[in-house]
Image (cartoon, helix red, strand yellow):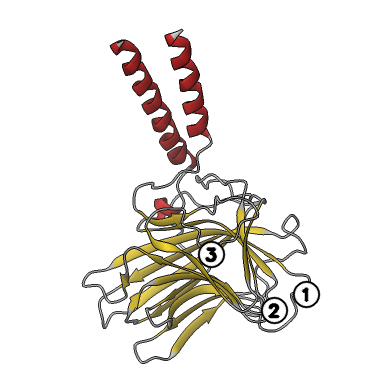
Amino acid sequence: MLFTRHARALSLLVGATAGLTVHGLASVIVDDPFDYLSGSSLPGQSGGVGWSGSWSLIGAGAAGTIQSNAFTAPSGYGYSTSSTSLQLTPGTGNVTARRAPSSTINLNPTSTQTYYYSILFSRVDSDPSQSNEVVSFLSMTNSSGQELVRFGTNSSEGLNILSTTNAGSANSVNSAANIYSTGTTFENAAQYLILCKMELNAAGTADIFSMSLYPAAGSVPSSEPAVWTLTMSADLSGTITNFNMAGTVNVGAVNFENFYFGSTYASVVPEPASSRLVVGMLSLGAISFLWRRRTRR
């Protein structure tokens, strides 16, 4: 009878670990897979690791809703996707989802600091030909709300990296127009993995920013790509205190899943075997715990 109870508990624990969304691989700084209750609102949600406080939503009439739609990721992407994702919809103005990491980021470090970011993205828009349709995959702001760095798109559906230089002027670079596709529903909108990199240097040395986009139907490299879709350099200053995802008033609805920000490429794009190993270790831990309990009785 005792063994039966242990076996039943073991099966439940192993089953639970098999379905986990894996967090905290080495060098992950913050993450949030948006694995919240379907139909709930984003403001006040506080899942993930590495954050200070919960999500807030900015924009008159804007909505941030957890939907029961799961992304398909490119092959070679090791993080699991849940059954839910985040949808941001503008109201009468722009929509911004904001959250503060527990540690700020100095744009003028004493030694070079490198950061990576990945997120799954799709866009629902019945009329993508309008003006003022800009998406921010990741906008990084200071404590005054000033945008210091932004990875996103321009109004021509091209990729865009924007930064504010030491002199306070904007510096940006754009890819070709229409680099990604939209759809009229989540199900028929093309899905992508967005991958970004920041190489931050001491004052007087240019910082380097890179971004690439990978369709869900394709694959993502197992190691950092030698060539990125878009790269720019600028000597920046300031302190990043908030992470934002945003869309301008005519953008339609933008969908996100699996927000990962880390200090290595593998922390935001782990190989599938890496995430399976974490789940396997959790399962073995459960087995070991129950076996020790059984043998002590």
Q: Which residue is at the front of the view, 245 or 79? A: 245
Instruction: Name the outermost residue toward the top.
Output: 1
Could you tell me how far apart the alpha carbons at marks 3 and 1 are, in whole angstroms? Answer: 28 Å
Say which residue appears at 46% left-offset and 58% top-offset: 225
- Tell me the quarter of the image containing the C terminus: top left
**Residue 196 point in image, percent of width and height:** 47, 65
**Residue 297 higher or lower than 25, as above or below:** above
Tell me the mark number nearer the camera, choosing from 3 and 1.
Answer: 3
Q: Residues within 10 Å of mark 1 (few under 14, many from 20)?
A: few
Q: Residue at x 54, y 52 (%)?
A: 220
Is 265 situated left or right of 110 in this image?
A: right
Q: Which residue is mark 1?
A: 127
Which mark is on residue 250? 2
Decide which of tag 3 and tag 2 comes sooner along the chain. 3
Amino acid at circle 3: Pro
Q: Residue at x 41, y 37 (%)?
A: 278
Disc 3, SS: loop
Is residue 265 toward the left or the right of residue 118 in the image?
A: left
Amino acid carrying mark 1 in the image: Asp
Kindly check if marks 1 and 2 are in contact, taking CB atoms under 8 A apart as contact: yes
Q: Name which quarter of the figure residue 88 lies in.
A: bottom right
Q: Earlier in the sequence, mark 1 or mark 2?
A: 1
- Relative image position of residue 54 (x, y in whole percent): 45, 62
- Could you tell me if the residues under marks 3 and 2 are in contact, i.e. CB atoms within 8 Å? no
Q: Which residue is mark 3?
A: 43
Q: Quadrant of residue 247?
A: bottom right
Report the residue at 34% width, 88% height from top. Answer: 166
Mark 2 burial class by Cα count in 10 Å: few <14, some 14-19, many 20+: many
